[in-house]
Image (cartoon, coloured by chain):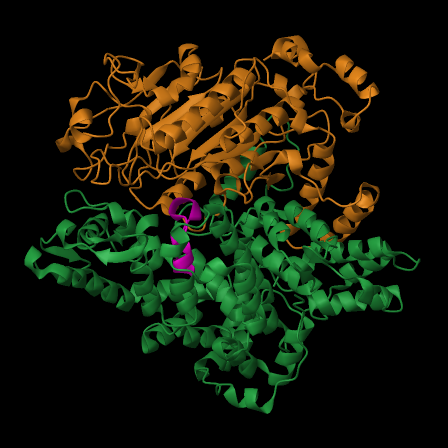
């Protein structure tokens, strides 16, 4: 099924479906822009002094004492920094930065669309994802990975490896070829936020992905949190299903506050963890993956979680015992620490590794005004002035792989071999075993570059109609090496390929006409280049 | 330590596929001809002669239950707190009984791989140790422990990264391409800030692929393309290119451990240590390695006698047993440490598991470690009135006391204020 980029113009009808721009005004005010600039300046300054001053000074002094005194040039240089200024070739006034940021890879079809619509309308187009016709992608999903629409009862008897691979492959396929790109980006975000390891919970994760994460990824945080708290997969992953009133299991109670809502500095104590674990006793699983509340193992005593008092109840209340937990979840959703934690984390995902207080406060206000409407928060975050001044972000390996597929625009019959690249890349989906999810940090991933280069080489050479076929004929028919590299620029770099990369590719291509092998190497090098690693 | 020569380092074990035999086979034809035979460097660099160890740092991620790793069978509260998950005492008549260490502490059968090192006094166990900060968050606790200082968000570097950054390279007789290696796809916090330090999940398969004939040109393209990249990408990419070239010449996959040591193929932790062992013996300049082993977050069905934690402990101890026989017992100057972010509650929960606690056990292994004992300080035991918040073994030794002494005495780095900022270490005599 060819899944290539789409150049079709936006119809009048589609235009009328685009929501009006209701981005809050404060986000565009000049004052914020100024403070943003000074932030960038101080951010750069901070980056240069990441090692504590005292430590660096001491280190330098001590350096003289060691036996062989040649100074290590790295010693005084902070090489760990999150804020990476964008390439000078990247347009700071147009829509390319938005397309790069809200998609898994900038390709001509998206550029055409964004250029036509302009910043706000394109953002709304991506936010109102259900109005984007994605039938082509979904037809592939249902034909190759039919298990993805099955209930847990049915998945229970399916082959476990098939279930796992179907979920992973369909996730990569959607990330790469769905037109609902921002939606896919947010699915990835919430998947990490409510991370689970498929090895522990097996087929249960399928329903969670479908009915929790994908259902609410661009919905409302309260709905999302509650859906997650009623997910059999989450109960199993964090051992809630084995908790009992006799000696409650604290795993889920802790992580729901630390990772899902308040954040680790959100103001709860070990006592709150213990109390919430009592509140949640009885939240468990029945059958082959249905969430249920079991009053027989609920702790009916009085409890207090973060100043919320829950009076003692009695077993005669039966199913009403679940309301204690619901009350705490509502309290957590409305807690100021949750607003701040979610706002900050979304800012880091979509905008900058180090958001300013101004930015955090603006997104917190949006959260509080809407009880956590995710689209509203994103409109605040992705305003033109903030994003055009934001540092670049490093593509994590999964993002890199999806980008590569988007830009290569291959014909895909089976994505298995490509998905398997994620093992060497260290980013197999649903495989991070701790509940914090894969890191989104430059200092964590930057050194992991060789597996990306190897993957680039491997997939650029895929040439099988039975699996993945990368067609190089258009590049070779471009007329000249320079014209082929122009095409690469458009398909892989949004027309903003850095000069150093262009010159490198020209040198590599040489003066003879491009043959098949050399063309594939050019594609591989384009994906291996520094600029392709960033968004 | 004297220079290590072939005869001193267990190289007899390599004879199975000696260079001469290899040449014979290669001449006979076959794919082997592509690779040089694997042999350790015969004369090690001067760095090996210096009184400075290579450090292998193991992080047991998830909060390893020190009371199961090294149970205090002499404390009756251990058995009353753990009615379903206790290890039977050494004098029990069941096969699952513990292995007596010092008439108070024991090792479970799943940890029996550590016995030879313990008996040779090369393995020290420190119990009741951990962090002064009482965070029970995995992620904060790991972060603080790896940083070497609690609650300092501005400290993005790790203690081992700062160790590397404050000493000159150990290897002085040739170019040093890689000093620190994280056996993972992403760089662990422990190593952050280290010069020439990369995460490499599998050094036996570290390549850019594609046609061999064009690989040098393609690497040249990358070298030029990343020359103008910003840090940390610039240094990482250039280090990576050098490392690709370096590893290509080593053929680590053909590595043969000494002393018949076996790193089980289905044990990813062991496979990582095997690669570290091979790199150490090739003398390429590696002086710090970070290796992780997960699976310790035993909230439910802990099953230390036959289930989840039994398996994790078995993976841990068989890998360390192999590394001990292969590297440490053969005299390479290496210190290995293994630790976890916190221990677990003294009392088990209703799920047959234990929730996040405080103190745990730390392991230190090496010829320069004063081992063969379980070190404690002001051990208060497990009686409820002595527990922190009524639930946890108290931390009576700060892990930085142990690490500081190792850094100073085994890694020959006096810059403790830089490596463990604000900490004034008490030396407890853990090194020889």
Quadrant of the image containing the N terminus of chain A:
bottom right
Looking at the image, residue A333 lies above or below residue B30: below
Looking at the image, residue B101 lies above or below residue A96: above
Is residue B105 located in the magenta-colored stretch of the structure? Answer: no
Residue at the image point whose x is 62% and y is 33% from the top? B179
Which picture quadrant has residue B177? top right
Which picture quadrant has residue B201? top right
Q: Which residues are magenta?
A: A194-209
Looking at the image, residue B204 lies above or below residue A341: above
Which chain did the renderer colour orange? B
Can residue A355 be seen?
no
Pinpoint residue B15: horizontal percent, then vertical percent: 68, 11
Q: In the figure, is residue B352 to the left or right of A76? A: left
Residue at the image point whose x is 53% and y is 80% from the top? A125
Residue at the image point whose x is 71% and y is 56% from the top? A529
Which chain did the renderer colour green? A
Q: In the figure, is residue A463 to the left or right of A150? A: right
Which of B424/B196 is in front?
B196
Q: In the figure, is residue A344 to the left or right of A392? A: left
């Amino acid at each position: 099924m060819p899944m290539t980029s789409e150049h079709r113009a936006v119809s009048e009808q589609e235009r009328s479906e685009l929501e009006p721009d209701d981005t809050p005004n404060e986000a565009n005010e000049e004052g914020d822009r100024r403070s943003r600039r000074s932030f960038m300046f101080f951010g750069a300054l901070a980056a240069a002094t990441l090692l504590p001053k005292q430590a660096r000074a001491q280190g330098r002094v001590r350096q003289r004492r060691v036996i062989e005194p040649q100074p290590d040039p790295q010693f005084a240089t902070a090489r760990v920094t999150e804020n990476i200024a964008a390439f000078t070739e990247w347009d700071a006034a147009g829509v390319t930065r938005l397309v790069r940021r809200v998609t898994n890879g900038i390709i001509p079809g998206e550029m055409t669309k964004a250029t036509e619509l302009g910043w706000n309308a394109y953002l709304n187009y991506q936010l109102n994802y259900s109005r984007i016709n994605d039938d082509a992608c979904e037809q592939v999903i249902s034909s190759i990975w039919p298990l993805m629409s099955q209930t847990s009862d049915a998945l229970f008897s399916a082959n476990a490896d098939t279930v796992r691979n179907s979920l992973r492959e369909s996730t990569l396929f959607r990330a790469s070829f769905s037109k609902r790109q921002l939606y896919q980006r947010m699915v990835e975000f919430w998947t990490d936020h409510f991370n689970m390891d498929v090895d522990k919970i097996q087929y249960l994760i399928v329903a969670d992905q479908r009915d929790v994460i994908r259902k609410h990824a661009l919905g409302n945080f309260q709905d999302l949190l509650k859906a997650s708290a009623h997910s059999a997969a989450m109960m199993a992953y964090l051992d809630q299903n084995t908790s009992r009133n006799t000696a409650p299991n604290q795993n889920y109670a802790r992580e729901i506050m630390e990772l899902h809502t308040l954040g680790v500095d959100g103001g709860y104590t070990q006592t709150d963890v213990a109390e919430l674990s009592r509140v949640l006793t009885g939240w468990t699983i029945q059958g082959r993956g249905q969430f249920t509340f079991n009053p027989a193992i609920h702790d009916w005593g009085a409890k207090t979680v973060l100043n919320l008092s829950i009076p003692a109840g009695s077993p005669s209340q039966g199913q009403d015992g679940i309301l204690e937990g619901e009350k705490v979840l509502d309290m957590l959703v409305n807690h100021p620490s949750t607003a701040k934690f979610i706002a900050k984390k979304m800012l880091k995902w979509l905008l900058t590794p180090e958001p300013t207080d101004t930015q955090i406060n603006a997104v917190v206000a949006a959260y509080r005004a809407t009880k956590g409407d995710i689209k509203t928060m994103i409109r605040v975050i992705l305003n033109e002035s903030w994003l055009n001044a934001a540092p670049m972000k490093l593509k994590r390996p999964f993002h890199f792989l999806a980008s590569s597929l988007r830009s290569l625009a291959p014909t895909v019959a089976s994505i298995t071999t490509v998905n398997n690249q994620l093992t060497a890349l260290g980013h197999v989906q649903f495989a991070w075993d701790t509940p914090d999810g894969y890191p989104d940090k430059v200092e964590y991933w930057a050194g992991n570059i060789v597996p990306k280069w190897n993957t680039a080489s491997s997939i650029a050479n895929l040439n099988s109609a039975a699996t993945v076929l990368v067609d190089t004929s258009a590049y070779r028919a471009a007329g000249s090496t320079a014209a082929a590299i122009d095409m690469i620029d458009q398909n892989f770099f949004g027309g903003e390929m850095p000069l150093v990369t262009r010159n490198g590719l020209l040198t590599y291509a040489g003066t003879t006409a491009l043959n098949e092998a050399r063309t594939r190497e050019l594609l591989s090098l384009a994906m291996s280049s520094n600029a392709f690693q960033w968004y | 330590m004297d220079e290590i020569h072939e005869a001193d380092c267990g190289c007899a074990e390599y004879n199975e596929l000696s260079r001469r035999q290899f040449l014979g086979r290669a001449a006979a034809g076959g794919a082997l001809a592509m690779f040089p035979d694997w042999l350790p460097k015969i004369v090690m660099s001067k760095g090996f002669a210096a009184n400075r160890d290579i450090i292998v740092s193991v992080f047991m991620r998830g909060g390893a239950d020190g009371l199961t790793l090294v149970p205090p069978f002499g404390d009756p509260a251990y058995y009353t707190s753990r009615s379903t998950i206790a290890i039977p005492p050494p004098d029990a008549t069941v096969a699952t009984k513990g292995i007596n260490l010092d008439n108070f502490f024991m090792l479970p059968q799943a940890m029996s791989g550590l016995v030879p090192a313990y008996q040779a006094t090369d393995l020290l166990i420190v119990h009741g140790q951990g962090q002064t900060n009482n965070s029970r968050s995995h992620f904060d606790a790991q972060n603080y422990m790896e940083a070497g200082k609690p609650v300092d968000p501005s400290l993005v570097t790790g203690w081992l990264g700062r160790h590397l950054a404050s000493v000159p390279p150990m290897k002085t007789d040739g170019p040093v391409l890689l000093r620190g290696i994280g056996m993972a796809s992403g760089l662990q916090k422990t190593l952050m800030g280290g010069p020439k330090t990369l995460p490499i999940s599998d050094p036996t398969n570290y390549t850019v692929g594609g046609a061999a004939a064009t690989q040098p040109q393609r690497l040249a393209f990358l070298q030029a393309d990343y020359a103008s990249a910003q840090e940390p990408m610039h240094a990482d990419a250039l280090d990576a290119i050098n490392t690709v070239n370096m590893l290509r010449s080593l053929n680590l996959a053909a590595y043969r451990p000494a002393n018949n040591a076996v790193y089980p193929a289905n044990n990813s932790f062991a496979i990582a240590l095997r690669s570290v062992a091979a790199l150490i013996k090739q003398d390429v300049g590696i002086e710090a390695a970070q290796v992780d082993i997960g699976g310790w977050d035993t909230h439910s069905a802990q099953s230390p006698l036959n289930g989840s934690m039994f398996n994790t402990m078995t993976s841990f101890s068989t890998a360390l047993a192999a590394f001990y026989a292969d590297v440490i017992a053969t005299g390479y100057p290496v210190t290995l440490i293994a630790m976890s972010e916190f221990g677990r509650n003294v009392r088990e929960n209703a799920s047959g598991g234990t929730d996040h606690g405080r103190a745990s056990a730390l392991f230190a292994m090496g010829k320069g470690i004063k081992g063969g004992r379980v070190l404690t300080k002001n051990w208060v035991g497990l009686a409820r009135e002595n527990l922190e918040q009524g639930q946890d073994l108290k931390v009576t030794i700060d892990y930085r006391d142990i690490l500081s002494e190792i850094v100073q005495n085994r890694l020959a780095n006096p810059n403790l204020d830089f490596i463990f900022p604000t900490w004034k270490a008490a030396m407890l005599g853990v090194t020889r």
